[in-house]
Amino acid sequence: MKKSFYSNGKLLITSEYVVLDGAIALALPTKFGQSLHIEEGADDLFHWKSYDADQSVWFEATIPFSSIIKKERFGGEENIKNRLIEILHEAYKINSNFITNSKGYKVITELTFPKNWGLGTSSTLINNLAHWLKIDAFELLKNSFGGSGYDIACAQNNTGILYQIIEDKPKIKTTEFNPDFSENIYFVYLNVKQNSRDAIANYFNNRGSIAKELPFFDAITEGVLQSSTVEEFSKLLEKHEILLSEILEQSTVKELHFQDFNGTIKSLGAWGGDFVMAVSKVNPAAYFKSKGFDTILTYQEMIL
């Protein structure tokens, strides 16, 4: 019997990086996500096929159960296969029944966004697998990819969330975020896919003691939620960018690429790639396209 699961993609609006140290973050699920379809197979094998948003196959592999049990590593250009085996191995350690009580599986995954967009190809997969196997998605993420877990919370919720890590456990509070000025909010893809794992590792290696900074990010997150005007919202985002640029010792994305933009630009998630949020009183599509950035989505197009 075929089983199907779906998880939402994600965008981290505030407290990127510092959410790992306990700051309160605002995150929003997207209208884009990923499906997982599973059917019974044979020969103690996973037959796995992954489709991108344009229906092209971006990954295909046959993985023996024995490779999952042993966490076998493959050389050459098999990095995606190795990552998948790692996730399935960690799932097996939590609940081995899907291996011990099965003859095999045919698996299809389908993205509704281009995988390079960085909206959660990995987190949506992990949440779908956890749903299928009836295990804790946060535990599976922690044991395989790592990260704060906000992306799992977005995968599971159809509304905005306030996300915080307290004593190594996720605290999730659903919240409404649909401001009156949402028509002034746009999302622009920077044509670069960021590696979240590398970005997190770099943050942990380079940050100093930031405990005293966390209340500032908490206050900004609360202010963003309460903003009643686009001007108030923009000022808070600009303050957030400056604070985080000092912690990361990196220039803001506006300083790097968009100094002449008449509006506010804020990085989302790992700095340097994926999507940024642009706030503008006029449609900025022509401006960004003139700079070579052709993927621009409105708030209504992107956010669930």
Image (cartoon, helix red, strand yellow):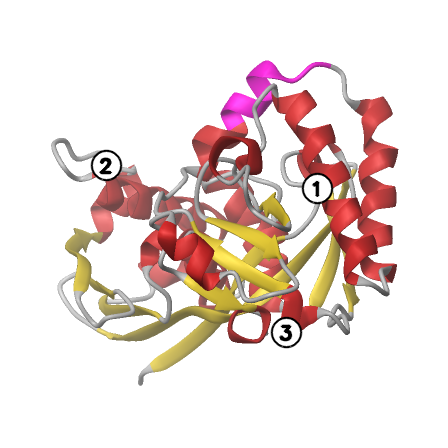
Q: Looking at the picture, how far across and down is residue 71, in whole percent?
A: 29, 38
Distance Cα–Cα, label 1 vs label 2: 36 Å
Distance Cα–Cα, label 3 vs label 1: 20 Å
Q: Residue at x 80, y 38 (%)?
A: 217
Q: Residue at x 35, y 42 (%)?
A: 86
- Upstream in the sequence, badge 1 or badge 2? 1
In the drawing, what numbered circle is on residue 188?
none
Name the residue beneath numbered marker 2.
72
Residue 280 occupies which quadrant of the picture?
bottom right
In the drawing, what numbered circle is on residue 15?
1
- The secondary structure type at the circle numbered 1 is loop
Q: Which residues are magenta?
A: 201-208
147, above or below 131, in the image: above
The reply to whether residue 221 is visible in this rendering is yes
Looking at the rendered structure, the kind of residue marked 1 is Ser
Q: Nearer the viewer, mark 3 or mark 1?
A: 1
Q: Looking at the picture, how far across and down is residue 214, in whole percent?
A: 82, 32
